Amino acid sequence: MKNLKKQMQKKLQSKSGFTLVELIVVLVIMGILTAALVPTVTGYIGDAQDKVDASNLRMAEQAALLYLTDWEINNDAESELEDLTVASLVEKGYLSDADETLAAYTITYTLKENGEYDKYDIEVKAPTS
């Protein structure tokens, strides 16, 4: 019993653990790794946002082209084509309500002179930020 008591006291008195220097070294290493990874991660986020913007532009352009083609089929030549906005494309069902991020995009179109298959020049501009 005395032997067990001595062992317990010895364990309680022994100071095991990390020193302050060891903890500081670990923190410095973690800081270096973080400093190396943050620019990489933010670069990936920026690239992803660029791809989302490009996809949104293509989606709005295709919706505008579909609307213009439908308008041409369903209306006579004397009808006047209204201004085309993202809001009007959503209202008419050419874009879904989920495409709210496109609301600030502007759409311009012109009729090409001798375009049989490719009649419209459509330009969709993202909002400047």
Image: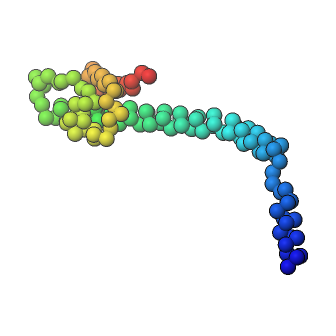
Measuring from the top left, give residue 7's x and y in whole percent.
Answer: 86, 70
- 49 and 4: which one is in front? 4
In this rendering, is residue 12 above or below 88?
A: below
* Residue 15, image quadrant: bottom right
Q: Is residue 58 left or right of residue 85?
A: right
Q: Is residue 87 left or right of residue 48?
A: left
Extreme residue toward the bottom, this view? 1
Q: Is residue 17 left or right of residue 85?
A: right
- Name which residue lies at 58% across and 35% down: 42
* Residue 77, image quadrant: top left
- Name which residue lies at 26% across and 27% down: 85
- 12 and 72: which one is in front? 12
User: Could you tell me if residue 31 is visible in this image?
Assistant: yes
- Name which residue lies at 41% across and 37% down: 55
In this rendering, is residue 42 above or below 110?
A: below
Measuring from the top left, give residue 129's x and y in whole percent.
Answer: 44, 22
Extreme residue toward the front, this view? 2
Measuring from the top left, give residue 128's x and y in whole percent.
Answer: 42, 21
User: Could you tell me if residue 114 is visible in this image?
Assistant: no
Measuring from the top left, give residue 64's x and y in whole percent.
Answer: 28, 32
User: How is the structure coloured here?
Assistant: rainbow
- 106 and 12: which one is in front? 12
The N terminus - image quarter: bottom right
- Name which residue lies at 83% across and 57% down: 16
- 39 and 106: which one is in front? 39
In this rendering, is residue 102 above or below 110?
A: below
Total marks shown come to 0
